[in-house]
Image (tube, grey):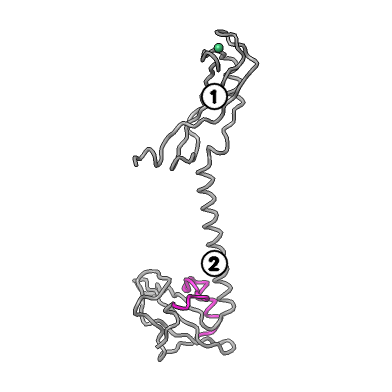
């Protein structure tokens, strides 16, 4: 496929007007066809945004003779750029809003999980106290009033992950202890990057040894 077919400039017919009130100077019939075109930037043929001015043409439906300059100007003046010329832009904005919406929803949910922790919750910890950023997991295994007992993952990661690597698991012999207000503080400071609750039954988050 060539580049032009993927994106670029193309001419779009934005309006066609049949006028039966004007007599053709050439053949005497009453049917003039006015067409208005405008260029646009397209992606996969979907108009993104109009480019340049509208152009109008007029032709007699019978003899193809073109005249009527005055009427052409009138029609051109009243022709608005139709909304479909912005289809791609509207689509792209829609997608952006969707992403923002789900992102916010996700953030709200994470905040809820932090406020009301449940046994089994897995926290992705972002540790940037040392020079090199590290990620690892904590798993909440016991709640006693305000106290939270956590297991940590065997591995640490140098980039953000959402799942455990093939040989990772939670280490049973080493339980950490924290209080809920610290958990809230960690989240507020960005140290807790994500919370997983309803993870898949085959997830490695279940593995403790
Ligand atoms: Zn004619």
Q: Which of the 4 quarters of the picture holds residue 170?
A: bottom left
In percent of the image, x 58 and y 86: which residue is there? 146
Magenta segment range?
A: 178-202
Q: Earlier in the sequence, mark 1 or mark 2?
A: 1
Residue under numbered circle 1: 35
Label 1 CA crowd tier, 10 Å (few <14, some 14–19, many 20+)? some
Residue under numbered circle 2: 107
Q: Which mark is residue 97?
A: none
Label 2 CA crowd tier, 10 Å (few <14, some 14–19, many 20+)? some
Is the residue at mark 1 in contact range of ligand 1, meaning its CB lies under 8 Å from it? no
- The x and y percentages for residue 128 are 40, 72
Viewer-closest of 24 and 116: 24
Residue 127, above or below 60: below
For numbered disc 1, what is the local secondary structure?
A: strand
- The x and y percentages for residue 10 are 44, 33
Q: In this image, 98 relative to 138: left or right?
A: right
Residue 1, above or below 127: above
Q: Which of the 4 quarters of the picture holds residue 29?
A: top right
Q: Which quarter of the image is occupied by the C terminus? A: bottom left
């Amino acid at each position: 496929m060539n580049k032009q077919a993927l994106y670029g400039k193309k001419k779009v017919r934005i309006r066609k007007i049949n006028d039966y009130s004007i007599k053709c100077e050439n053949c005497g019939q009453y049917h003039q066809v006015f067409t208005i075109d405008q260029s646009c930037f397209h992606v996969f043929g979907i108009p993104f945004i109009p480019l340049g001015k509208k152009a109008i043409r007029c032709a007699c439906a019978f003899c193809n003779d073109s005249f009527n300059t005055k009427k052409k100007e009138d029609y051109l003046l009243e022709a608005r750029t139709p909304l479909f010329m912005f289809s791609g832009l509207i689509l792209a904005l829609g997608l952006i809003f969707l992403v923002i919406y789900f992102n916010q929803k996700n953030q709200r949910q994470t905040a809820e999980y932090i406020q009301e922790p449940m046994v089994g919750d897995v926290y992705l910890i972002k540790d940037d106290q040392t020079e090199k950023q590290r990620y690892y997991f904590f798993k909440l295994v016991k709640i006693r009033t305000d106290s939270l007992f956590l297991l940590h993952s065997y591995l640490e990661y140098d980039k953000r992950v959402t799942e455990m690597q093939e040989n990772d698991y939670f280490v049973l012999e080493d339980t950490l202890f924290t209080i809920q207000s610290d958990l809230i503080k960690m989240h507020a400071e960005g140290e807790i990057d994500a919370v997983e609750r309803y993870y898949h039954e085959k997830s490695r988050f279940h593995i403790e040894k």
